[in-house]
Image (cartoon, rainbow, N blue to C red):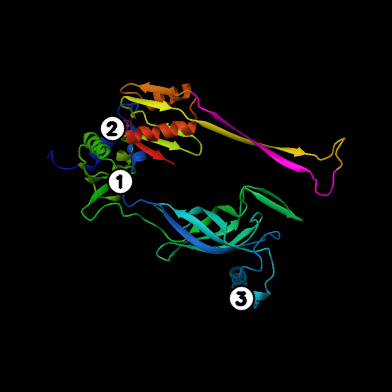
């Protein structure tokens, strides 16, 4: 019965694929290019109080903090009106955390704590029990613990000394999961969908071809630019895990879009290796106008003139205008030149980083830059 499917055969094929030939220089694991649909992170959020601050908490102007302290004390049988709370050792905060794709009860997560009032610093504080809820309004974790703040702020008599941002901190492993999360990997028809991080038709086709070549019993097809659909030969939970592990460790050479990224603030230019230019001539030159103004003080006192009330000290401005028109510099690049060739040529004529970026924008508008230009 050659057509009868044997799960042990699938395992052997997968192990053979994982231990195959070395990857090519440009190959990347599918695990680093894509993810399986159904496995995703999620955000949770909560409102809480940080106590134990050395007088750096919220002021009396923050009514929400005063009301929160009053409500908390009421839970312990202490009746204190909100306007009677006058301590600056408490701060109202928002607590955030990220849920992984798979979560078990008791798992610990890092919680980020950020002030929402006018607290000067959260250093030395302790976060009180705070439920963290998701988009469905269900509590997935509870956070509590001492804050680790990577900064400080000290103020005395108007003198302030501050480092980094002391109004935000982290409670390491401070959130404990209270609700499990199990991803739904398989579709209703029993297939698996692989989602590319960067949608691209060429890459999607290469991934599907690589899976079909390495895993003979798994049929893969690129249905979109960012989605590859896999037929699962063994639909059991163990079979899904084996299949996902085998697919993630396959290597594919992704097709990278030609792109040049420039940052005008820092003058940084980053380009891929597949960016090239058509034959182009760049002319760079400018006119520098310098206007300076000096002031001369004229004193009325002299050996032969006796000053009166109408004669005073005068300030006389003297203005000079100087125009410099340097020689125009030009650069000619042949067909197939790279961004590196262009930048080196512009550097040779003493062009600044801002001028290099302006030249790149001009070449792109002229149609000689065959890449996407991203200006940050």
Q: Residue at x 62, y 47 (%)?
A: 164
The circle on residue 309 is none
Q: Position of residue 122 (x, y in %)?
A: 63, 56
Q: Is residue 274 magenta?
A: no
CA separation, marks 2 and 3? Answer: 65 Å
- Foreground mark, 1 or 3? 1
The circle on residue 16 is 2
Label 2's element? helix
Mark 1 vs 3, N-terminal side: 3
The circle on residue 195 is 1
Nearest the viewer among 25 and 293 is: 293
Mark 1 vs 2, N-terminal side: 2
CA separation, marks 1 and 3? Answer: 50 Å
Q: Position of residue 290 (x, y in %)?
A: 57, 33
Residue identified by numbered label 3: 74
In the picture, the quarter occupied by the C terminus is top left
Q: Is residue 72 left or right of residue 278?
A: right
């Amino acid at each position: 019965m050659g057509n009868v499917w044997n799960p042990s055969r699938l395992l052997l094929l997968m192990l053979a694929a994982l231990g195959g030939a070395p990857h090519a220089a440009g190959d990347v694991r599918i695990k680093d290019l894509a993810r399986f649909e159904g496995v995703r992170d999620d955000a949770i959020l909560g409102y809480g109080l940080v106590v134990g601050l050395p007088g750096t908490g919220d002021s009396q102007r923050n009514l929400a903090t005063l009301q929160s302290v009053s409500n908390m004390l009421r839970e312990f049988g202490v009746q204190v009106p909100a306007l009677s709370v006058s301590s600056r050792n408490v701060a109202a905060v928002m607590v955030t955390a990220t849920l992984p794709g798979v979560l078990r009860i008791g798992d610990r997560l890092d919680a980020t704590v950020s002030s929402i009032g006018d607290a000067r610093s959260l250093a030395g504080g302790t976060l009180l029990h705070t439920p963290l809820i998701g988009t469905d309004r269900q509590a997935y974790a509870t956070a509590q613990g001492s804050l680790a703040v990577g900064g400080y702020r000290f103020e005395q008599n108007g003198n302030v000394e501050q480092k980094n941002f002391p109004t935000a901190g982290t409670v390491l492993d401070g959130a404990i999961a209270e609700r499990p999360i199990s991803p739904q990997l398989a579709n209703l028809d029993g297939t698996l969908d692989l989602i590319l991080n960067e949608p691209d038709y060429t890459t999607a086709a290469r991934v599907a071809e690589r899976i079909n070549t390495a895993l003979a019993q798994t049929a893969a097809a690129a249905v979109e630019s960012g989605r590859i659909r896999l037929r699962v030969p063994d639909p059991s939970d163990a079979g899904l895990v084996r299949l996902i592990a085998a697919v993630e460790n396959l290597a594919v050479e992704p097709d990278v879009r030609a792109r040049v990224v420039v940052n005008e603030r820092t003058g940084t230019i980053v380009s891929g290796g597949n960016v090239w230019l058509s034959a182009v001539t760049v002319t760079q030159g400018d006119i520098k106008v310098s206007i300076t103004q000096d002031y001369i003080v004229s004193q009325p006192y002299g050996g032969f003139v006796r000053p009166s009330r109408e004669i005073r000290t005068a300030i006389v401005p003297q203005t000079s205008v100087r125009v410099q028109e340097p020689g125009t510099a030009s650069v000619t690049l042949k067909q197939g030149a790279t961004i590196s060739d262009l930048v080196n040529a512009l550097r040779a004529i003493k062009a600044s980083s801002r001028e290099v970026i302006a030249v790149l924008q001009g070449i792109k508008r002229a149609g000689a830059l065959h890449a996407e230009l991203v200006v940050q």
